[in-house]
Image (cartoon, rainbow, N blue to C red):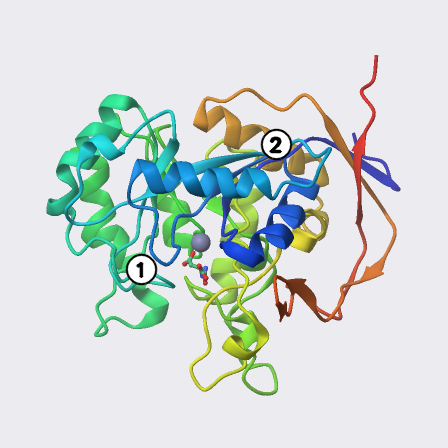
Amino acid sequence: MTDNKALILRQPDDWHVHLRDGEALADTVAATARQFARAIVMPNLKPPVTTAALGRSYRDRITAAIPPGTDFTPLMTLYLTDHQDPAELDPTVFTAAKLYPAHATTNSAAGVTAIAHIRPMLDTLQRLDLPLLVHGEVTDHDVDIFDREAVFIERTLKQLVNDYPALRIVFEHITTRDAVAFVEACGPNVAATITPHHLALNRNAMFDGGIRPHAYCLPVAKREVHRQALLAAATSGSPKFFLGTDSAPHEVSTKESACGCAGIYNAPVALESYAASFEAMGALDRLEGFASEHGPRFYRLPLNEGRVRLDRTAFTVPDRQTVGQGKVVPFMANEVLNWSFSGPIPPQN
Ligand code: NCD
Ligand code: ZN
């Protein structure tokens, strides 16, 4: 339901989030669980989540960090590596597996160097009917960083989709019109997540009057024409596109550095910033499908029964958030957002 003042949505889920570990968990889990009932939790820890035992213990640490009285379910992912026992793909632990091309992004050094190495894992995923989640960028330094997603489609993803026609694949955090067109042209087994920051920022944001490390993430934001394609896809109503924040906190000093980390911490303002982008497109009525329906349908999980409410109450995003012992600059810091998240609403009879 939408009117001018309130937006009531079926409780959404986040289909791509980095909760980190250790002291960070209390804050990251609280921020995500405040808005989302479930989240697909990325496995790029140090060391990465490469076994069922590691997945189980990480899930236990996340569960222990859920604020009392909050209903939140972490959905775990296995980090794929070159040499892995398919028995690690335990469906009682993992909802999906994540393909990081080696060295593509934060903590991906142990990732996959060639698809040939993970054929046994891909066969097993297809047989178990578990989705493969893909960080879609080539890592070749000869390829321009702004072209790495489009080149990945040509060099890797097309073949993968061809070779595993029954495998469900999520092309994560897409950033280009090429990715939108590719996903649209595939069958219903191929979908994509879209982040709030890629809907809001183009690549100019990283160089706005000076270098802006808090607008830097991977895949890096692209030209405006690509942002427009992402907005069109997210608001199209197509079940192939759904919410995945890629919320990825890095402590301030590791971003504001001569070699700053990639990642944007958007969990504290996730729904508010998606709402801003959908409203700018005149498509607030499409937000519920994107945020709360397309993801569970793709993952073949039940839709959430609860409802949440956003109110048209402007607020200024704080310039710092506490994450564990450190401070993180959140997405949209110091900016005004017009929709405020007000929390769950009581069930209607
Ligand atoms: C993520 C991180 O920091 O873990 N960073 C990012 O820029 N998105 C890794 C990732 O999803 O690529
Ligand atoms: Zn990510």
Q: How dense is the environment of label 2, judged by Cα within 10 Å: few (below 14), some, or many (20 and up)?
A: many
Amino acid residing under circle 2: Ser
Please identify the quarter of the rendering in which residue 116 is found.
top left
What residue sits right under mark 2 in the picture?
A: 292
What residue sits right under mark 1 in the picture?
A: 108
| Residue 15, x across and y down, in percent | 50, 40
Q: Which marked residue is nearer to the observer: mark 1 or mark 2?
A: 1
Amino acid residing under circle 1: Ser
User: Within the displayed image, which quadrant is ligand 1 positioned in?
Assistant: bottom left
Please identify the quarter of the rendering in which residue 70 is found.
top right
Q: What residue is at 47 percent from the left and 38 percent from the top? A: 59
Q: How dense is the environment of label 1, judged by Cα within 10 Å: few (below 14), some, or many (20 and up)?
A: many
- Spatial CA distance of label 1 from label 2 is 29 Å
Classify mark 2: helix, strand or loop. Answer: helix
Residue at the far top in the pictured view: 349
Q: What residue is at 68 percent from the left and 21 percent from the top? A: 305
Classify mark 1: helix, strand or loop. Answer: loop
Quadrant (top left, top right, bottom left, bottom right) of the N terminus: top right
Query: Which of disc 2 and disc 1 is earlier in sequence?
Result: 1
* Dot 1 beta carbon under 8 Å from ligand 1: yes
Q: What residue is at 40 percent from the left and 55 percent from the top? A: 45
